[in-house]
Amino acid sequence: MIRRATVIALGALAAAPAAAQPSFDCRRASGGVEAVICANPALSALDRDLATAYLRVGGQPGVAEAQRAWIAQRNRDCARPARETPAACLQRLYGERLAALRPAAPAATVPGEKDALTGNWRPVGGNRTGQLALEPLRDGRWRVRMRVAVQGQPGASCDGDWIAAARPDGALAGRAAGEGGDPIVIRPAGSELAVSAPSDHGYCGPAGDFAGRWAR
């Protein structure tokens, strides 16, 4: 999870959130508006959408400060609204905040046809096994999940989870949805993908290298 963005990005993104879950862990909800969000699938979906929108622009000047101020307003105004239900208050504020964040985000384009990238890929060459899964998101970006392992070394495996957007040069680039926010770049190369990603041998062991060529 993205612990350093817990306050700013409405909680951490789980590696594979359930359809009805918000971006934060409902088991740790502090009550109040968080309890209302967890009990409402539509609000949970809005919370995930907002966390995703924030991840795209959170590094721009003033965005983090504005997000903190918005969260404080959300918690204050929607705890006991005088003229609407808490759910209606949250629906309105989330809509306003999404509208404010999305214009600041760079336009997302998809390199080539979605069908050419969507699905599962396997590592090419070497002694690695694993899978790279590409999933297009509604906003034009991509969810990237990777798992690699070393043949003949049980337990030597590593997982990665990224949110990536298309660049003008046709590559997908993004930051990890895990602690540290490691970068990844995926370039279509004919019938294969060329992946550039950091190796983290301290955490993942010898299987920590996601970089290389991947094919169907």
Image (cartoon, rainbow, N blue to C red):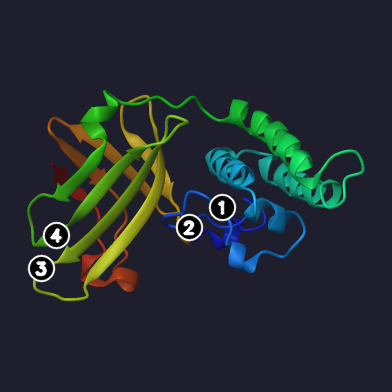
Return the residue at label 1. 23
In the image, residue 7 lies at what x, y percent? 67, 57
Residue at 21% across, 70% down: 206
Q: Is residue 87 left or right of residue 126?
A: right
Vertical comparison of 36 with 200: above or below: above
Nearer the N terminus, badge 4 or badge 3? 4
Residue occupied by mark 2: 14
Q: Are marks 1 and 2 in contact (CB under 8 Å)?
A: yes
Q: Amino acid at mark 4?
A: Thr
Say few, some or many: other residues with alpha carbon within 10 Å of mark 3 (under 14 / 14 to 19 / 20 or more).
some
Q: Mark 1 belongs to which amino acid?
A: Ser
Mark positioned earlier in the residue sequence (1 or 2): 2
- Which tag, 4 or 2, sits closer to the chain's start? 2
Q: Residue under circle 4?
A: 129
Q: Is label 3 or label 2 in front?
A: 2
Q: CA distance from mark 4 to mark 2?
A: 24 Å
- For the residues bearing labels 3 and 1, Cβ distance under 8 angstroms: no
Task: Specify the label residue 151 is tagged with.
Answer: 3
Seen from the viewer's position, the closer of residues 212 and 48 is 48
- Mark 3 vs mark 1, foreground winner is 1
* Within-10-Å neighbours for mark 4: few <14, some 14–19, many 20+: some
Which kind of residue does numbered mark 3 sit on? Gln
Q: Mark 4 to mark 3: distance in Å?
A: 7 Å
Please, what is the three-letter code of the amino acid marked with disc 2?
Ala
